[in-house]
Image: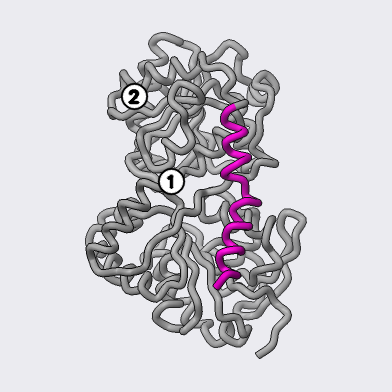
Amino acid sequence: MSHSFGPILYVDSADFSRPLYGSGGATVCGSAIRHAASSFVFVGYTSDDDRLGYVTRKRLYGVDFNFMPIGRAPSGRRWVPEAMRFGILLQRYRRGIADLGITRLFTRTYSALWWCAFSTNWRAYYYAPGLGNPLLIGRRPALGRVFSGVYNYLQGRALARTTVAFAAASEDEIAKHNRYLTSVGLTRKYERLPTAVNTDLFKPRPRHIARGRLGIAPSAKVFVYSGRLARVKGIDLLLESFRTVRKRYSDSVFLMAGHGEEEEWVRRTIEAMDLGNSVVLLGNIPPEQLAVVIAAANACVVGSHTEGFSLAMLEHAACGRPIVSTDVSGARDIICDGVNGFIVHQRDPDIFAAKMIDATALSNVARYSCRLVEENYSEERLWQSVLQRVNAD
């Protein structure tokens, strides 16, 4: 049937009735609205009283866009895993979605990919937030270990039916994963599509002004972490390293932005290390506030055991702040060792702490990092790449 909507469905388990932030997936949804809204009909959750299963007009970031809500945004923990719940809702509203007459789908949500691959004959464009099994690093790792084999089987079958598979990962990680896919008999290969950052928001700002807004002394050594509060993010390494730094610089401050399933564990760890007066948990703050927090930093830190292609690192780089990171996917793309930060190959708090201190003395970081981000990781470049690739098929 004919329609007046954009030619592609953008399906994601995000709440499209509110500003989108707090996770990589939500941030990508927000950038799609800002830079490519006319190309999509967005399908996902709402917190408003929108009629489920019907297209409505919404407005975010000063942009109007077409949106079909299929469920109310979840609140709190649920027994049914979120990805499964979202897949069930897609099946429930399958007829209404099909009536739009759109037969191309873009998604970062694996259950949406499975639904498209196994329930439709549409063309699916999948943007993987990373190349590992998300069940093993998700919010329910014990449950994830039980079902990881099921995920691998279903994901492999879905990829075989996918038109294009993108991945937010380094070239080396993608090449390695593609060799694995070949070894298990899959012909579909991932194409590289790095994460992108909002350079209108995340940009260099005067440190002293940011600290004035946050009430932080100009002389303090300030370190910033932004991301999920979970063990997989290496929070223990970061706190142990900061404790070592604080022994040398007693007025040091560690600002941690984000929330997560292990926040209480983080609080207990901070208390056990006697860091309560110098570590500040900011919670899940809006991007506008996060940009100010990063601007206040002498250096930003990433301690993850695994990453896709870290949005946090890009935000830190776009703000012109040095980064100290473990050797995760994307680190070698963003960090030039000794120029705009350091990559630490050992999970040793003393070594990591030494690099944190060294990073505070780096100069000309913004000149290098901002050019790198503008030329390779802007949101506008991301959506130009996506739409060119999709429209080429």
Q: Amino acid type of disc 1? A: Gly
Q: Residue at left 50%, top 17%? A: 360
Is residue 208 found left or right of 283 in the rendered image?
right
The answer to which quarter of the image holds residue 142 is bottom left
Quadrant that contains the N terminus: bottom right
Quadrant that contains the C terminus: bottom right
User: Which is the main secondary structure of the residues drawn in magenta?
Assistant: helix
Q: Is residue 74 above or below residue 289?
A: below
Q: Secondary structure at mark 2?
A: helix
Give the magenta range.
368-393
Where is residue 292? Give x, y as percent. 64, 31
| Mark number displayed over residue 260 | 1
Q: Secondary structure at mark 1?
A: loop
Q: Is residue 239 above or below residue 304?
A: above
Q: Residue at left 56%, top 64%? A: 389
| Mark number displayed over residue 240 | 2
Q: Nearer the viewer, residue 228 or 180?
A: 180
Q: Residue at left 65%, top 62%? A: 17
Where is residue 145? Give x, y as percent. 24, 58
